[in-house]
Image (cartoon, rainbow, N blue to C red):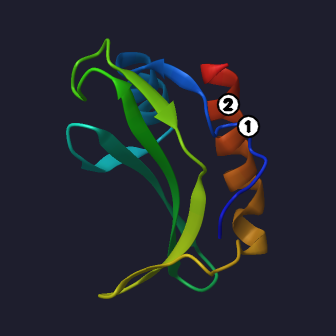
């Protein structure tokens, strides 16, 4: 599920700041190379035992990743359900039990980077 209107899409900051802030909110940088990174927050629906991910992409605008002074731009966050061993289903909706957590994390990230 694409999370529109979060206010994250288009935020530009130095990589060092983004990396520190987003990791401080519990996200992990799982996938990255020299010009992009993907941060994932693993969420578990305790009632069903289902694993979900809140994913925030970041693209390098200037410099190279791993350089704290490189400029990155955040993309539109997505939410998906983990389908072992096949990947992530981005058509999944946010379970009611996780709605508050997802909103709080997105809002905290936006506030910290604005």
**In the rendered view, would you say 33 is above or below 2?**
above
- Element under label 2? helix
Q: For mark 2, what is the residue? A: 110
Q: Residue at x 25, y 29 (%)?
A: 65
Quote the CA–CA distance across marks 1 and 2.
7 Å
Q: Position of residue 70 (x, y in %)?
A: 32, 18
Badge nearest the viewer, 1 or 2: 1
Q: Which residue is tagged 1?
A: 7
Quadrant of the drawing holding the C terminus: top right
Residue nearest the observer in this picture, 24 or 11? 11
Asked if disc 1 and disc 2 are in contact, CB closer than 8 Å, the reply is: yes
The residue lying at 63 percent from left, 21 percent from top is: 112
The residue under the point 55% across, 72% down is 80
Q: Which residue is at 66% across, 64% downward?
A: 2
Where is 40 relative to 1, above or below? above
Image position, residue 73 (x, y; %): 49, 31
Labels in figure, total: 2
């Amino acid at each position: 599920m694409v999370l529109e209107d979060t206010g994250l899409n288009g935020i530009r900051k130095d990589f060092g700041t983004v990396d520190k802030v987003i990791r401080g909110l519990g996200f992990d940088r799982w996938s990255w190379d020299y010009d992009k990174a993907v941060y994932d927050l693993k969420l578990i629906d305790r009632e069903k035992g289902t694993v979900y991910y809140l994913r925030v992409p970041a693209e390098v605008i200037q410099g190279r990743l791993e350089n704290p002074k490189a400029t990155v731009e955040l993309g539109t966050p997505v939410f998906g359900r983990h389908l072992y061993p096949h990947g992530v289903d981005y058509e999944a909706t946010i379970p009611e039990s996780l709605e508050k957590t997802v909103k709080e994390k997105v809002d905290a990230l936006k506030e910290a980077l604005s």
